[in-house]
Image (spheres, helix red, strand yellow):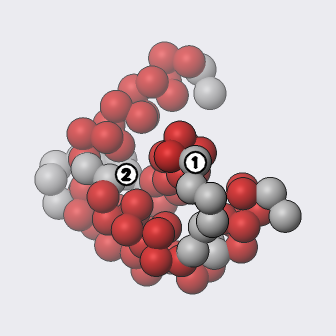
Amino acid sequence: MSQVEIINSFKEQLEIPLEIKKDDISSQGYDTVNVDEIWELLLKKIKKNKYEEIHLHILVDEIFAIKANDYMSFITMKAWSGK
């Protein structure tokens, strides 16, 4: 099983942490936050860190480590690249 498949297998269990992070970023004045983009950012961060094994607690930690600035930088780069 690839790393992305393993991560995707946890997505349903991560709905609440993703919603909490969405609300956290929204409370800082960013109105257009959505869970799918936070998920994309999480996948990018996990690939970059190259964990040997992926566990649920690692994913939760990575979600809560995302800052509003990280999210906005990700969205800006995504818009510039046209993806």
Vertically, is 61 above or below 72? below
Would residue 70 be found to the left or right of residue 77 on screen? left
Asked whether 21 or 59 is in front, the reply is: 59
Residue that appears at 58% across and 48% down: 50
Quarter of image, res 64: bottom left
Q: Is any part of residue 51 visible from this angle?
A: yes
> Which numbered tag is attached to residue 50?
1
Q: Which residue is mark 2?
A: 33
| Amino acid of disc 2 | Val
Vertically, is 11 above or below 49? below
**Real-space CA distance between mark 1 and mark 2, rounded to the nearest whole angstrom:** 26 Å
Asked whether 62 or 81 is in front, the reply is: 62
Residue that appears at 72% across and 57% down: 3
Would residue 35 be found to the left or right of residue 29 on screen? right
Dot 2: within a 10 Å radius of its alpha carbon, few (fewer than 14), some, or many (20 or more) residues? some
Dot 1: within a 10 Å radius of its alpha carbon, few (fewer than 14), some, or many (20 or more) residues? few
Q: Secondary structure at mark 1?
A: loop
Say whether disc 1 or disc 2 marks the residue closer to the N-terminus. 2
Q: Picture coordinates of residue 8 (x, y %)?
A: 69, 65
Vertically, is 77 above or below 32? above
Q: Secondary structure at mark 2?
A: loop
| Amino acid of disc 1 | Lys
Residue that appears at 57% across and 82% down: 13
Q: Picture coordinates of residue 47 (x, y %)?
A: 59, 45
> Which numbered tag is attached to residue 62?
none
Q: Is any part of residue 40 visible from this angle?
A: no
Would residue 16 be found to the left or right of residue 24 on screen? right
